Amino acid sequence: MSVDIDVVNWRMEEADETIVLTLDVAGQRANALSSTVLEEFDRILGQIESRPLQGLVIRSAKVNGFIVGADVNEFQKIVDSTQAAALARAGQTVFNRLAGLPFPSVALIHGNCLGGGLELALACTYRIAREDEATRLGLPEVRLGIHPGFAGSVRLPPLIGDLAALDLMLTGRTVSARQAFALGLVDETVPERHLLNAAHAFIARHPHRRRATWWKRAPSWPFLRQPVFRLLQRQLHKKANPDHYPAPYRVLDLWRRAASQEEEALSLGELLVGRTSRNLVSIFLLGEELKRNGRRNPHGIAHLHVIGAGTMGADIAIWAAFKGFRVSLQDQQPEALARTVKKAYGFYRKKLKKPVAIQNAMDRLMPDAGGNGLRRADLVIEAIVENADVKRGLFRTIESIVRPGALLATNTSSIPLEVLGEALKDPSRLVGLHFFNPVAQMQLVEIVRGKQTSDSALERARAFTVAIERLPLDVRSSPGFLVNRVLMPYLIEAMTLAQEGIPIEQIDQAATRFGMPMGPVLLADTVGLDICLSVAEMLSGPLGISVPDRLREAVERGDLGKKSGRGFYVFDRSGRPRHRAVRGHTDTPVIERLILRMLNEAAACLREGVVDDPDSVDVGMVFGTGFAPYLGGPMRYAEALGEVGIASSLRRLAQEYGPRFEPDEAWARSDLLTHHTVPRS
Ligand code: NAI
């Protein structure tokens, strides 16, 4: 029997004195806890709490999961910490009402149960999860620069123990249903078809709630709490700079103080309006925007054919088969195919664990030396040697073989699409799908538009990229596209600094202290100095980048970086660079030169229309290179520094070090640099 109540996001049914409440947020793919959803939930609880019921079941109608967390879009509208704390307090009040019901409540969890969603589940008497790999539970708030705010930090330790709770909150990692059961986070895991019955059984039996055993709670004993805190804080210092990422330190501090819900809300309020969270939230929303953009149209791709099983082609094929696509992989060298199959097996075993799932993924990936898959493919991605003539020859040959509706893509990192398109009768079907190395880790894919590329080719390319869970960023076909072009002056400047005699360790440490995931010299060694040299040479003509002698000489000697054991660094057998200790340095002049060259190039890209707006630069550089996420990307950082200040610093550097620092004319045109797609607070 359905029960009448004036809400739009919840559905309420009642049978045998048990209410089944289904969340189905109107007009959205996933359930997020907006203020409206919480307010409706509160009204429902108000209506049922005084009734003589047996129990309450809470579940989601969305295919992809339970609840993904609080509604992040609302974060951007918050003006101050008082308002932010009030938002947390409001959520706590509703969840306390849920926890205080006079009858048992059960959360039925499938798919994503994250952040505020898990906090809602924690306020229930019991939690039952669907037992499959798609079910993921976690508190990923630190990734947005905040911590739980709906009493999660208070409810979790008594349930699963202090160290396990801190681990989940500090890392933001998610766990599967099986792992959640082992942790004590859920009471039972069952297949889909038993979910509702299991909930009714729990309500009927009404067993004691799960609680952490005494030894799992031992770290919270007064005489252990302080030493455990100090130990964890020391470990944290190795991973995150508190000035850049304060949230995990707040999590630890709340735990050390055995903080109340009110203290949790106040702390969250401060974090939510701080620089780091504002920037991380904006980058997150920009990533979501790219996904939405890609989902607008169907890709119509079931079979992918990849040509070239080298570094990139192999990884693209392995990844696409992992994400459910049928993939044939062609290479002129049979050994390359054999290597890929071996690599795929290792990758799937690590990721999928279950033999059936591994076997299915292996079955989807077909080595295809003869290129038989070409005839059946809906999408062909070419990842052969970076040579325009060879690539053109390949496209000429395959155009007569592929189906009329097949989409053609190139992974080229430097050849203009127009040049490759010359080989085709119909160049409108050619698009660039520029992946980054390693494919499994780098989320970005540049969707390269040549002059002749059709809109429908671009739409399909974007949709395919989202379907393999990567982020599609539109870029115009021009030398280096966006990411390599903006990165290269930064890498070259690092090599120039090294050439001037500054220790490479000092250069890299300055960059990592600034917030880069890896220093530029080590990054160049890791990418491969031969690749750096070829990209630098390709950009040297159009952009006037001069290639440092040290780079050229290293490549001539065969010192290619990590892969040859020696580049700027010397690498040990396990691939770790040997560092020399550096002392007595200041980071500022080094960082200023490195970052301003990057910002200047980014401004040039905007002026030339390589990407549409500063947000695209930011999302591209954060997801394509790991540019300091707490700063929100290069253009947001530029905004914080101020355009006038940047231009005058560049002029000063130009006088000292030469014309490569001349400020781009875009700095004088603030309309180019401050247009944002996602509203900024
Ligand atoms: P690679 O040299 O590792 O692999 C190329 C593979 O293609 C080799 O296995 C070769 O046997 C095969 N091949 C060459 N000609 C062929 C043909 N006509 N038919 C079939 N197979 C053929 O090269 P890598 O690094 O994977 O680069 C491939 C493409 O991806 C290039 O266009 C490159 O610019 C681009 N790229 C490379 C990145 C990197 O970090 N290596 C990053 C992004 C793009």
Image (tube, grey):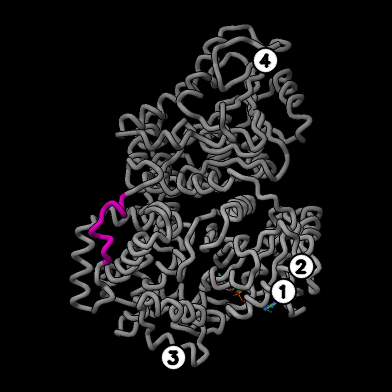
Q: Residue at x 74, y 71 (%)?
A: 330
Marks 3 and 4 sit apart, C-alpha to C-alpha, by 74 Å
Residue 9 percent coordinates (x, y): 56, 22
Q: Main secondary structure of the magenta part?
A: helix
| Tag in front: 4 or 2 | 2
User: Amino acid under label 4?
Assistant: Glu
Residue sitting nearer the eye, 555 or 375: 375
Q: Which residue is mark 1?
A: 397
Which residue is denoted by mark 2 in the rendering? 401
Asked whether disc 3 touches disc 4, contact meaning CB atoms under 8 Å apart, the reply is no
Label 3 or label 4, whichever comes before in sequence order: 4
Horizontal relation, residue 651 to residue 331: left or right: left
| Numbered range of the magenta stretch | 664-674
Element type at marker 3? helix
Marks 1/2 in contact by CB < 8 Å: the verdict is: yes
Classify residue 581 as left or right of residue 15: left
Residue at the spot of label 4: 13
The earlier-in-sequence mark between 4 and 2 is: 4
Measured from the top left, where is residue 512 in percent x and y? 38, 65
Whether residue 252 is visible to the viewer of this picture, yes or no, is: no
Residue at 70% x, 59% y is 406
